[in-house]
Image (spheres, rainbow, N blue to C red):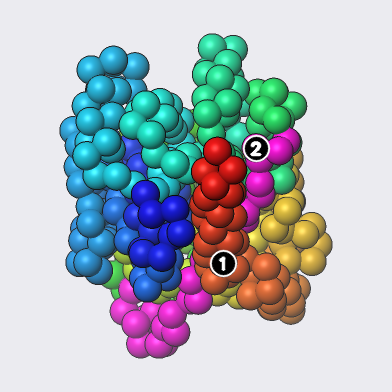
Amino acid sequence: MDRNIKRKINVIHLVEGLTIGGLEKVLTSIALNLDKKKYNVSVWCLREGGFFADKLLKEGIDVKILHISTSRNPLSIYKLYKLLKNCKFDIIHTHAYSAGTIGRMSAFLAGVPVIISHNHSVYDYYNTYYHFVEWFLSLITDRIICISDIVNRFANETQRINTKKLITIHNGIDSEHAVSEKRTSGLRKELGIPADHSVICTIAHMEEHKGIKYLLESASLLLQSRNDVSFLIVGEGALKEELRKTCVVLKIEKNVIFAGERSDIPEILSLTDIFVLPSLREGLSLAILEAMACGKPVIATNVGGVPEVVKDGISGILVSPKDPEALHSAMNELLGDREKRKKMGHNGKRVCNESFDSETMIGKIEDLYDYLLCKKVKHWRKS
């Protein structure tokens, strides 16, 4: 490595896969928006590509699919070590547990100067072994980026990681795209949403921790007193068929639309009246930020980093997790008060513009890259 850093800095982002999801969207935003005059950016996927891998390739980013299925196999670590050794990166920036485990071990062995890990959630369901691995790997990590203060606190208090290794950089989103009324009207027709229906939307992987079954139970309560609401569920996941069956059991299937994975999120949010996220755990939901950036009021569970974004009674309503009655009450309150929806949406949009834009996130990440590289250079000069 050029100790004066007068050339472009070679950065690799390592992730398990790049299908549609919040983590994947954040990584894509970082890769596309880092200063191209200053950084050469590569993105490597351990297992698979997907929607965002294709997007990065179209934008000219170097993307590789490594077909490494596990981070525990010593042969996988050796394979990645050889690849990193040959490519001579200045910085490795890993995302989430699997990539963070194999990536940091391999990068340390390969002599990559700067090692950064990015924590995208509160992993409170991990057992003691996983927490020990995170602590152990922190010893060879220059900095661990936490997407919210609660993630930072969890890493310190539960995983015993030194606070000097931790830094909070909130997720940021790109400015929303303007969506015409004609496009929104066409989407309503495509999805089968009646013109006179209010739309309550959630965007999430259909996994247990997203709490979608509690949203469906609250929908059942709401639809007992009114039938002019459509619930739009965007995303895929292991629980999709089970959730469909739940709708049938609750007799709400005519008012619930499973839209699958979508790439037209600005359009989806434009036809939304209320955005709901009923998660049982969260780091810092990108879907909430996107909804707020589009001026939509948010109802969300008071978990993880959510209250760092949604201020109860100001930009949305916070409720306890696993509480369909609280969700029902909040939805009923906002559906009955258009002015409150409008005011909360306006407040949320202002908060996003001021504190959670991608430009701010990218600036902080670039500052971190520069600081850590300069620190290495000073160390080399002394030695």
Looking at the rendered structure, the secondary structure element under dot 2 is helix
In the rendered structure, which amino acid carries the disc numbered 1?
Gly
Q: State the image coordinates of residue 362 (x, y, percent, origin top left).
A: 52, 64
Examine the image and state in which quarter residue 249 appears.
top left
Q: Is residue 173 left or right of residue 49?
A: right
Q: Considering only order in the chain, which callout, 1 or 2, is on the residue closer to the N terminus?
A: 2
Q: State the image coordinates of residue 369 (x, y, percent, origin top left).
A: 52, 55
Are there few (<14), some (14-19), or many (20+) residues within 10 Å of tag 2? some
In the rendered structure, which amino acid carries the disc numbered 2?
Lys
Residue 244 can be seen, yes or no: no
Q: Which residue reaches farthest right? A: 313
294 to 57, vertically: above or below: below
Q: Circles 2 and 1: CB distance less than 8 Å?
A: no
Residue annotated with mark 2: 165
Looking at the rendered structure, the secondary structure element under dot 1 is helix
Examine the image and state in which quarter residue 220 appears.
top right
Residue at horizontal 38 percent and vertical 58 percent from the top = 9
Q: Is residue 367 left or right of residue 347?
A: left
Residue at horizontal 22 percent and vertical 30 percent from the top = 82
Residue annotated with mark 1: 363
Q: Nearer the viewer, residue 10 or 310?
A: 10
Q: Which residues are magenta?
A: 163-188
